[in-house]
Image (cartoon, helix red, strand yellow):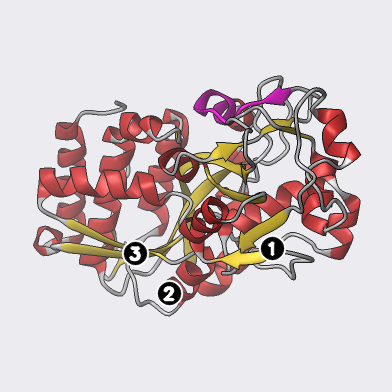
């Protein structure tokens, strides 16, 4: 726990004094976007409502939808796993900040294979998603898994059908480890998939992989755990096969330079490090700098502040990585400088 709830409450009261609003009257905060962090946001929201009575209404509709909704000002905040570059933030009058970090993991439904036992490296993984490797007993997969009884069965590729930050993180990784993927498919929230079937949200991909034999997909790690899915071990940049764990997500995030990242734009895929999980990413919050509804914007900031201060253990229980203390301090300093209502800043400078 970084700061006590009492300190967080005092901070919120100071913010109230600054803008002279009555944000305590706000009973519901509305947000929409990424499915990647939804398990953590849901757990924080439940605890926060118990503490304050304020409800979080969060629509997990994908990062693309979250960006559209905040740009249309239909929500108090948007959420995206694909960070916007500073130029795009400035264009729309937005600021963004990282809320939590986690991992995207490949999951399979192949009879007899246990979680973490199947090994893949980046080039082989990319060729599966390119449709060039089509059978589980392909020599490239067998070479990585000597002695494993792999079936002579067609691989069904499952991907996201919606605009998705999870896809943005996933295709960032594939573009870094495969020049062919980078040139032919690319890196975006939505791409023209060479093969496969699409599911909406992490839930949709998890559902398809769970039902389709001999399939492979990619989901946020909490969904893999909650759905008892068989995840894959991946070869990282240092040449080690690693498992998706909170420790290994943290290892990938260890070198992130948030202080010098314009607009907190930071990409954590294919990072160096002996333990680094190669498909690690952060999830971001998007808010307007000029709050048209300052009470709601301030209520959202109070929720995020409380989550930073009190949500670490809840996030870690779901194998997310909380933001480091120095990053939280930097984020909240940025709130006080950039997010304003008609009477001035909505968050007090510390």
Q: Nearer the viewer, residue 46 or 29?
A: 46
Q: Considering the numbered disc 2 on the image, is that residue within a helix, a strand or a loop? A: helix
Q: Considering the numbered disc 3 on the image, is that residue within a helix, a strand or a loop? A: strand
Task: Specify the quadrant of the image occupied by residue 2.
Answer: top left
In the rendered image, residue 241, in percent from the top left (x then y), is placed at: 73, 24
Residue 85 visible in this rendered orientation of the protein: no
Q: Residues within 10 Å of mark 3 (few under 14, many from 20)?
A: many
Residue farthest toward the bottom in the current orientation of the protein: 72
Q: Residue at x 59, y 32 (%)?
A: 253
> Which residues, given as a range, are shown in magenta?
241-250
Q: Residues within 10 Å of mark 1 (few under 14, many from 20)?
A: some
State how far apart marks 2 and 3 are (Cα): 9 Å
In the rendered image, residue 185, in percent from the top left (x then y), is placed at: 81, 64
- Going by the image, does 143 lie left or right of 256? right
Q: Which residue is mark 1?
A: 188
Circles 2 and 3, Cβ within 8 Å, touching? The answer is no
Q: Which residue is mark 3?
A: 31
Q: Is residue 58 above or below residue 38?
A: below
Tag count in the figure?
3
In the rendered image, residue 152, in percent from the top left (x then y), is placed at: 80, 45
Q: Is residue 95 above or below residue 248?
A: below
Q: Nearer the viewer, residue 314 or 346?
A: 314
Labelled disc at residue 326:
none
Point out the tag, 2 or 1, that comes first from the N-terminus: 2
In the rendered image, residue 8, in percent from the top left (x then y), is placed at: 21, 38
Q: Nearer the viewer, residue 283 or 349?
A: 283
Labelled disc at residue 69:
2
């Amino acid at each position: 726990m970084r700061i006590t709830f009492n300190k967080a409450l005092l901070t919120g009261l100071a913010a109230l004094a600054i803008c002279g609003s009555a944000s305590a009257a706000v009973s519901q905060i509305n947000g929409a976007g990424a499915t990647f962090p939804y398990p953590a946001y849901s757990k924080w929201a439940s605890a926060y409502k118990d503490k304050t009575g304020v409800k979080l209404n969060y629509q997990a509709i994908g990062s693309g939808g979250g960006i559209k909704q905040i740009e249309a000002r239909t929500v108090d905040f948007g959420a995206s796993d694909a960070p916007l570059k500073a130029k795009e933030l400035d264009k729309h009058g937005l600021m963004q900040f990282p809320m939590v970090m986690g991992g995207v993991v490949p999951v399979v439904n192949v009879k007899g294979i246990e979680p973490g036992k199947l090994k893949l490296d980046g080039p082989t993984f990319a060729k599966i998603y390119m449709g060039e490797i089509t059978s589980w007993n392909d020599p490239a997969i067998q070479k990585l898994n000597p002695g494993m009884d792999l079936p002579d069965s067609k691989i069904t590729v499952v991907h996201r059908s919606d605009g998705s930050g999870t896809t943005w993180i996933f295709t960032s990784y594939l573009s870094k480890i495969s020049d062919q993927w980078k040139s032919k498919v690319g890196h975006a929230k939505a791409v023209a998939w060479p093969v496969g079937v699409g599911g909406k949200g992490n839930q949709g991909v998890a559902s398809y992989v769970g039902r389709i034999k001999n399939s492979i997909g990619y989901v946020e790690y909490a969904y893999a755990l909650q759905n008892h899915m068989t995840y894959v071990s991946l070869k990282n940049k240092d040449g080690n096969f690693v498992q998706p764990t909170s420790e290994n997500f943290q290892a990938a995030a260890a070198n992130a330079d948030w202080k010098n990242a314009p607009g907190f734009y930071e990409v954590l895929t294919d990072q160096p490090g002996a333990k680094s999980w190669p498909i690690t990413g952060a999830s971001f919050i998007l808010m307007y700098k000029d709050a048209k509804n300052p009470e709601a914007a301030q209520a959202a900031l109070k929720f995020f502040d409380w989550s930073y201060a009190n949500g670490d253990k809840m996030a870690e229980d779901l194998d997310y990585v909380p933001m480091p203390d120095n990053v939280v301090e930097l984020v909240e300093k940025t709130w006080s400088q950039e997010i304003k209502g008609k009477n001035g800043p909505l968050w007090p400078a510390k």
